[in-house]
């Protein structure tokens, strides 16, 4: 069984920084893209950033220049460094990864971690 476990998040004032991490565990053969999505109050879930195994990253327009995604393939971990946070960044942040096991290729999600930015 594969699990994604997130850590980080919390409450920060506008202009501050937070970091998130997410580690995949289980009978993993390989991990393809890993990323972060978020869902704010009354909003649809949206892509924050994604990174492939070669380190190529894609960012949502609203976070470009402020957030940085990275990953450690040896640790099956993806990170999100969030700088210059704004109140509109307030959301539940979900880790996401496409993971191959011996039986299948599936998309997995973490349980979500709350990020709250106060004005």
Image (cartoon, rainbow, N blue to C red):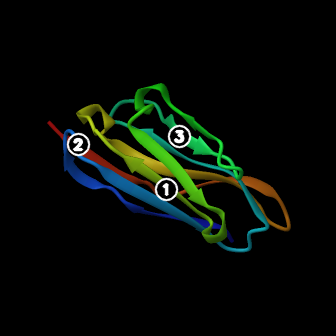
Residue density around tag 3, few if under 14, some if 14–19, many if 20 or more, within 10 Å: many
Q: Residue 79, relative to residue 67: is it above or below?
A: below
Q: Is disc 1 placed on a helix, strand or loop?
A: strand
List x then y, in percent, for residue 54.
71, 50
List x then y, in percent, for residue 93.
42, 48
Q: Is disc 3 placed on a helix, strand or loop?
A: strand
Q: Residue at x 55, y 66 (%)?
A: 23
Residue at the spot of label 2: 117
List x then y, in percent, for residue 55.
65, 49
Q: Is disc 2 placed on a helix, strand or loop?
A: strand
**Furthest residue toward top:** 61
Q: Is residue 40 toward the left or the right of residue 16 in the image?
A: right
Marks 1 and 2, how far apart in space?
A: 19 Å
Residue density around tag 2, few if under 14, some if 14–19, many if 20 or more, within 10 Å: many
Q: Residue 70, relative to residue 46: is it above or below?
A: below
Disc 1 + disc 2, Cβ < 8 Å: no
The quarter of the image holding the N terminus is bottom right
Q: Quadrant of residue 117?
A: top left
Q: Residue at x 29, y 32 (%)?
A: 88
Residue at the spot of label 3: 49
Q: Nearer the viewer, residue 77 or 37?
A: 77
- Mark 1 against mark 2, which lies toward the viewer? 1
Q: Residue at x 51, y 61 (%)?
A: 22
The quarter of the image holding the C terminus is top left
Give the tally of numbered discs.
3
Q: Earlier in the sequence, mark 3 or mark 2?
A: 3
List x then y, in percent, for residue 79.
49, 56
Residue at the spot of label 1: 79
């Amino acid at each position: 069984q594969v699990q994604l476990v997130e850590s980080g998040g919390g409450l920060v004032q506008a202009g501050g920084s937070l970091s998130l991490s997410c580690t995949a565990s289980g009978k993993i053969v390989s991990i393809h893209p890993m990323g972060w999505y978020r869902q704010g109050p009354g909003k649809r879930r949206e892509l924050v950033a994604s990174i492939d195994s070669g380190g190529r990253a894609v960012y949502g327009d609203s976070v470009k220049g402020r957030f940085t995604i990275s990953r450690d393939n040896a640790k099956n971990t993806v990170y999100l460094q969030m700088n210059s946070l704004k109140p509109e960044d307030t959301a539940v942040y979900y880790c996401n990864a496409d993971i191959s096991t011996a039986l299948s290729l599936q998309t997995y999600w973490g349980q979500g971690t709350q990020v709250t930015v106060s004005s």
